Image (spheres, rainbow, N blue to C red):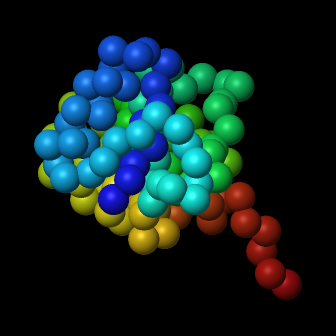
Amino acid sequence: MRIWVGSSSSLRATSLAALLGVLGFQAVFDPDAARCAAGVLELEDALPPFPTAPDIPTLLVTDAPEACVFALIRSGFRGRIGTRDGGSALRSALTAVARGEIWLEPAAHRRFVDHLRTLARPIN
C-alpha cells in the first residue's frame, strides 16, 4: 500500500518513511491521491492556523492536545496516533484510515463523540 509521508522536518519524514517500509508499506513524498491509499502527517506543533488536510485519508502523528486533534479531525484528517506509539499502532491506524475509518484511542474516540454532541443542535 502506498502511503504519503509529510513532516515539517525532512529527517523525521525520512525516519517515518523507513519505519513504513519495515511495516510493509511503500512510502512516497508526493501526495498524489490517485497513487496513495492514505497519508501520514507528522505535526510537531498543532497550533492554529491548522494545516489543510490533503485529498487522501490522512493520519496525524502528533502529541498535540486533544482539543487541537479534534479540530484537525473536524477539518478533514482521519485520525491520530502519538509520537511514542509503536509500529503496530501505526500499521493498524493506517490500515483503518485507508478503509475510510476514523482512528483514535478508544477513550479519545468516546471523548470525540461527546465533543461532537456538544456541537450538535437539538432536533425539535
Whether residue 38 is visible, yes or no, is: yes
Q: Position of residue 16 (x, y in %)?
A: 29, 31
**Picture residue at 66% right of the left edge, 30% below the top:** 50
Total residue callouts: 0
- Quadrant of the image occupied by residue 11: top left
Q: Position of residue 73 (x, y in %)?
A: 57, 50
Q: Position of residue 58 (x, y in %)?
A: 50, 49
In this image, 14 relative to 88: left or right? right
- Quadrant of the image occupied by residue 60: top left
**Picture residue at 67% right of the left edge, 25% below the top:** 48
In this image, 89 relative to 114: left or right? left
Q: Quadrant of the C terminus?
A: bottom right
Q: Quadrant of the N terminus?
A: bottom left
Q: Position of residue 83 (x, y in %)?
A: 29, 31
**Picture residue at 37% right of the left edge, 25% below the top:** 13
Front residue (pair 26, 111): 26
Whether residue 67 is visible, yes or no, is: no
